[in-house]
């Protein structure tokens, strides 16, 4: 699976939007972009995934660049509960499915 | 959907002892994964099952580690002759099939004295 690059940490204010970037310049045409987050003392939690088009669900939105070399996870209104480590992971359609986690982005949310 | 359940949540043992962890996946999920996570790092893949068949093992899974998934339901991960370096959080995840989103348990934290 191709590698992703994320900032080590980001800060946000409560109730403001948050844009978490991810670079994946070596992405292949069949790699899906998955996002997971991990709250303190919990296992990772699936957030969203996409291939080419932007995706929305109840938790977040995923904006994928036209060339697919980068993507952005958007939390529309950050809450204190959104403070977590966010992981951007590429999953190949033909892969075994095991996730390759980097260090992710630690998001802090200030009240 | 009762989620993925892992037991115990915490395990403290002396170096050299054997330990076994259990994972109960979401009932209809065919895929079951084990990961290990050390402090400040992301989870690292250990092994996975498709139903009862163990299909891949990471090089991290030394011969002291063994995993089973009898009848394709719950899974156990056993570590024999534990070492200090085995101290970590052991996470289990399940999915309906490969490449589908994985659902994680809250892990078993192992501490080796």
Image (cartoon, coloured by chain):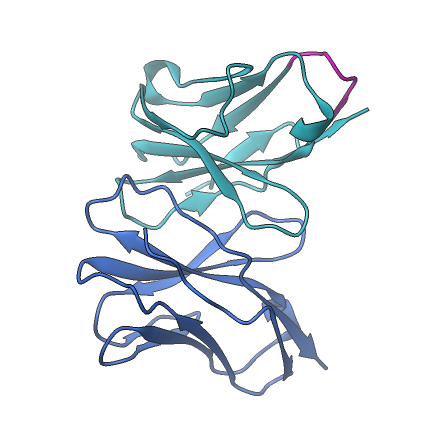
Q: In percent of the image, x 17 and y 63: which residue is there? A: A29
Q: In percent of the image, x 27 and y 60: which residue is there? A: A32
For the residue pair B12 and B105, the one nearer the viewer reads as B12
**Is there any visible trace of residue B27 in the rendered image?**
no
B27 within the magenta span:
no
Residues in magenta, as a range: B11-18
For the residue pair B12 and A100, the one nearer the viewer reads as A100
Q: Is residue B15 above or below residue B1?
A: above
For the residue pair A110 and B39, the one nearer the viewer reads as B39
Q: Is residue A54 above or below residue A48?
A: below
Where in the figure is residue B87, as x and y percent of width and height? 69, 31
Where in the figure is residue A76, as x and y percent of width and height? 47, 82
For the residue pair B49 and B23, the one nearer the viewer reads as B49
- The part of the image, by quadrant, that contains residue B9 is top right
B69 with respect to A17 (left or right): left
In what quadrant of the picture does the N terminus of chain B appear?
top left
Chain the render paints blue: A
Where in the figure is residue B63, as x and y percent of width and height? 51, 15
Q: Magenta-highlighted stretch: main secondary structure? A: loop
In what quadrant of the picture does the C terminus of chain B appear?
top right
B59 with respect to A57 (left or right): right
B14 within the magenta span:
yes
Q: Write down the colour of chain B.
A: cyan
Where in the figure is residue A16, as x and y percent of width and height? 57, 87
Q: Is residue A48 above or below residue B72?
A: below
**Is there any visible trace of residue B34 in the rendered image?**
yes
Q: In percent of the image, x 50 and y 41: which residue is there? A: B44
Question: How many labels were placed on the picture?
Answer: 0
Furthest-bottom residue in view?
A: A16
Furthest-right residue in view?
A: B113
Furthest-front residue in view?
A: A26
Q: In percent of the image, x 73 and y 26: which residue is there? A: B84
């Amino acid at each position: 699976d191709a590698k992703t690059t994320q900032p080590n940490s980001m800060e946000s204010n409560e109730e403001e939007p948050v844009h978490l970037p991810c670079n994946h310049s070596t992405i292949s045409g069949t790699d899906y972009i998955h996002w997971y987050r991990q709250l303190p003392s919990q296992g990772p939690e699936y957030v969203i995934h996409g291939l080419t088009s932007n995706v929305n669900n109840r938790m977040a939105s995923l904006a994928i660049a036209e060339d697919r070399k980068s993507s952005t996870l958007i939390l529309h209104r950050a809450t204190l509960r959104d403070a977590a480590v966010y992981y951007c992971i590429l999953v190949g359609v033909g892969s075994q499915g095991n996730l390759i986690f980097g260090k992710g982005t630690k998001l802090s949310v200030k009240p | 959907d009762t989620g993925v359940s892992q037991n115990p949540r915490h395990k403290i043992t002396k170096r050299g002892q054997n330990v076994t962890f259990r994972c109960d996946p979401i009932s209809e999920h065919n895929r079951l994964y084990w990961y290990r996570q050390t402090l400040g790092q992301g989870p690292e893949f250990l092994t996975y099952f498709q139903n009862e068949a163990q299909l891949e093992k990471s090089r991290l899974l030394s011969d002291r580690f063994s995993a089973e998934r009898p009848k394709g339901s719950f899974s156990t991960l056993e570590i024999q002759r534990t070492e200090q370096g085995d101290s970590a959080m052991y996470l289990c995840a399940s999915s309906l099939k490969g490449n589908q989103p994985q659902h994680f348990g809250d892990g078993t934290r192992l501490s080796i004295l």
